[in-house]
Image: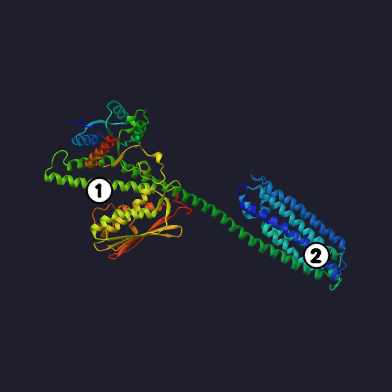
Amino acid sequence: MTTPAKILIVDDDLDLVAMLQLVLERGGYTVTTANDAAHGLRKVESERPDLIVLDVMMPDGDEGFQMVAKLREESEPYFAVVPIIMLTAIHHRTDLRFYPGHGVGTQPTAGYLQVQEFLDKPIDPARLVERVKRELGKAKKT
Amino acid sequence: MNKNGVLPATEELIERIGWLIRLRWVAVVGVALFLEVARRVFVVRLPLGSLYASLAALAIYNLVLTLVFRRFGERPSSGVVQSRGVLRWFLLPAPLESLGHDREALRAAVFANVQITVDLVLLAVILHFAGGIENPFLLFFVFHVIIASILLSRQATYAHATLGLVLISTVALGECWGALAHYPLGGAWRPDAYLDPVLVGAQLSVLGATLYLAAYMGSTIASHLRRREREVVLLSGDLQREAEKLAAAYEQVSRTERAKSQYMRKVAHELRGPLGTIQTALKVLLQGLVGELPDGARDLVARSERRAGELAELTHSLLVLSRAREAAVGGEAAEVELGEFVAGAVAEAQDEAERTGVSLTVARPPEPLLMRGDREGLLQLVGNLVGNALHYTPRGGRVTVSLARAGERARLQVEDSGIGIPAADLPRIFDEFFRASNARERRTDGTGLGLAIVNAVAVQHGGSVHVESEVGRGTRFTVELPLAGAGAQGPAR
């Protein structure tokens, strides 16, 4: 029997973190959490989760993006490939969404954020579980 | 005060002096021509030497005046006038005299006075060498009086009229009494008319009366004109101040509007986070992830989830609306192809159209319609219009969406055969949170922001939206948006 995948949730909304932890544990995953980008980075280093669920985060609305950028810059290959699902509200400027593979007007490809998936709030629990499953499946294949 | 610190009335005076100097050149040419004609055609025996010398004096004098006049424009000196009150009173025309503090005006007035005085003397001299009292041109003294009334004060005008009369009287009486030589015109003129005291007296009296009457009329008219001029100057000063106040007030209103919009955006932004969490919690409950809910509880949770969803819609609409109002669309905006937008919005709405039994068709032009704009705002604009049309059209009805080029603009029309908008509600239909009376009957869950967003987005892009409607027959919305390269882009805010 394989060990359940470990998922890291990083979000400053404590209530939401509690709910998502409940949902993912129900889905059979092991969950660890952090409430800000700094803690999040430390947890990634120390616990090496199989997938990260990351909120865009307040107050500036781009702490999440900064964290992704930092992670992807690290030299170890793990950091470059660990799947990330971002939780977002709709941003003021749609070019912030950085959907990989989607065109946003004249946004150059290099500007795309290196995450695997975006989920809009309010998070639908079933959809979250389904996306996590899908991304973990993809990661296993590579 | 103009930029040199000179009053507009002073500028006028200086300008008129320039005109007088130019006019004098015409006089020089005129007199020269006349002398030539007199010499050749009339063969009058006049002292041409003296006459040409006088003419030369006139020309040289005007040349000097021209040079002096140039310096008036170059070296304006303003500042408090140190002259005595009497001099000012005598020389300056009324408005300048009362405004007072203009050294330049005084200089100009002295200059004008000197000119007119010299002109009078020269005219008297020329007339003396050309027949004296016989010469019909002695009427020309009137011109000088009229010119004085235009340029100078009433007092100075009368003074010059008097001077003119004195000068010609000196010539006429001098010749009559033998103190001065007489140069007869000859020809048809009676050779001894100049000796007849009755005749000379009569001529001088009539001339005198003419000059004083001219002085009176000229001064009166001129003073009326100057008063009006002054009123105009004061009025335009007032107007300028009012315009500035208005501009400041408008700026204030714009700032307030922007502040309101920013506030609305911040509030909506803050509301979203907690709202989203509530929705997720309710979904977790509904999906049975913490155990099955009893029916009653399930019903309540479902209702709550629905209402929370409405709140989320509302806050999202408020955000879109405040964004559309805050920022004009600038040159850095993304390029958008309207046809694709419209087609996309219609495609998304097809499911609902089928469900509600309404036919939904779209017509778009073959060529792309490119504009610079905010994608999300434009999506909202098209989506809201199509959504409204579907919501308010009963089963069996139709909604037609058409997009076409209209010159430098794109014209989007969304027409339905729905319930229509009552005429009384039409003026307010774009107000935020306003819902037409018959709309509320049909659908209780509208936010009332949809059309406010449509209007705000259209205006933000430099376009406009109009509505025509008839209750029971249908509604047509027409949106016009400027296309890329059409010049002006977005309203200045």
Residue B410 image point, x, y percent: 41, 57
Tell me, for residue B167, which label it has, or none: none
Neighbourhood count class around disc 2 (C-alpha, 10 Å): few under 14, some 14–19, many 20 upward: few
Residue A33 image point, x, y percent: 25, 31
Q: Is residue B438 left or right of residue B95?
A: left
Examine the image and state in which quarter residue A116 appears: top left
The answer to whether B72 is drawn above or below residue B164 in the figure is: above
Examine the image and state in which quarter residue A60 appears: top left
Could you tell me which residue is drawn at 28 percent across and 48 percent down? B314
Q: In front of the other: label 2 or label 1?
A: 1
Coloring scheme used = rainbow
The answer to whether A76 is drawn above or below residue B255 in the figure is: above
Residue B144 image point, x, y percent: 73, 61
Task: Give the spatial CA distance, label 2 vs label 1.
Answer: 97 Å
The residue pinned by badge 1 equals: B310
Q: Is residue A95 left or right of residue B132?
A: left
Residue A101 image point, x, y percent: 35, 43
Q: Nearer the viewer, residue B427 or A20?
A: A20
Amino acid at dot 2: Leu
Element at label 2: helix
The residue pinned by badge 2 equals: B33
Q: Nearer the viewer, residue B425 or B74?
A: B425
Residue B423 visible to an observer of this rendering: no
Amino acid at dot 1: Glu
The verdict on a common chain for dots 2 and 1 is yes
Q: What chain is tagged by disc 2?
A: B
Sequence-wise, the earlier of marks 2 and 1 is 2
* Residue positioned most to the top: A46
The answer to whether A18 is drawn above or below residue B176 in the figure is: above
Element at label 1: helix
